[in-house]
Amino acid sequence: MVRRTSVAERQLEASIRERLRVLGDSLQSGEDSNLVVWVLDGAFACAQRPLRRHPIFGGRKPLPPEARSAVIGWVRRIVARGFVGIICLSHEKELRYYEPLRLHPDGLLGFYRASGLEVKHLPWPDPAHAHTAAERKRRMALVERIKAEASEAYECMPKPVLLHCSSGIDRSPPVAAFIAMRQQAQG
């Protein structure tokens, strides 16, 4: 059964998507004073995966070994900003982009954990990279399950929590809006 998304939730989703787009443009231009978009002030934010829109390494697959220090710096900055949890929607394929960096034996997610972050991984293939309309539709159909699992994870994690997929277009915005609306409804 597909849940009907409210107008308010769709508007919040669109706002999150736009703010992530603006953040990505800033990052790509070299302005990296901000790495996140707050959804629930002080408790919940979204970002793009590390270096996704970096002016030098952004979009490179896999990341070259010289990107290692930049990824380490990104994670250190997230931790320094007080984040204690990450919900990662990146698919295994996207996480393999970090393998050449040898951050941790368990990859990027292992590095997050070793950096003191609690991690919940909900791999979701990017609908934007589907090869057919039917495949895109199938991938998008996973959204209700992912929303529910991410919301449960958020509720159990220490705050603040950071949510990321890859670029913040198809996956993070609907999940973040759902979590935010649930939290607001719970008061």
Image (cartoon, rainbow, N blue to C red):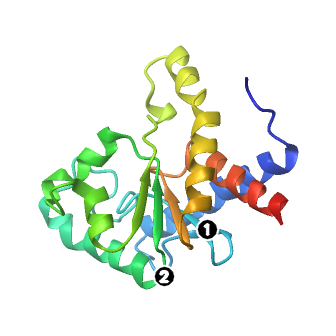
Residue at 18% of width from left, 61% of height from top?
A: 104
Task: Find disc 1 in the rendering and name its residue.
Answer: 44
The residues tagged by marks 2 and 1 sit, at their Cα atoms, a distance apart of: 11 Å
Task: Where is residue 85? Give x, y as percent.
Answer: 47, 67
Considering the image in quadrants, where does the N terminus appear? top right
Q: Which mark is residue 82?
A: 2
For numbered disc 1, what is the local secondary structure? Answer: strand
Task: Where is residue 47? Give x, y as percent.
Answer: 50, 62
Residue 4 visible to an observer of this rendering: yes
As shown in the figure, which amino acid type bears the numbered disc 2? Gly
Q: Is residue 37 above or below residue 174?
A: below
For numbered disc 2, what is the local secondary structure? Answer: loop
Q: Indicate left or right for 81 with 57 as reference.
A: right
Crowd around label 1: few <14 · some 14–19 · many ≥20 (10 Å): many
Q: Nearer the viewer, residue 128 or 84?
A: 84
Q: Is residue 85 above or below residue 167?
A: below
Tell me which corner region of the image, top left, top right, bottom left or bottom right, holds residue 64. Answer: bottom left
Residue at 58% of width from left, 67% of height from top?
A: 45
Tell me which corner region of the image, top left, top right, bottom left or bottom right, holds residue 50. Answer: bottom left
Q: Indicate left or right for 146 with 12 as reference.
A: left
As shown in the figure, which amino acid type bears the numbered disc 1? Phe
Q: Is residue 135 above or below residue 13?
A: above
Residue at 83% of width from left, 66% of height from top?
A: 187
Q: Indicate left or right for 81 with 11 as reference.
A: left
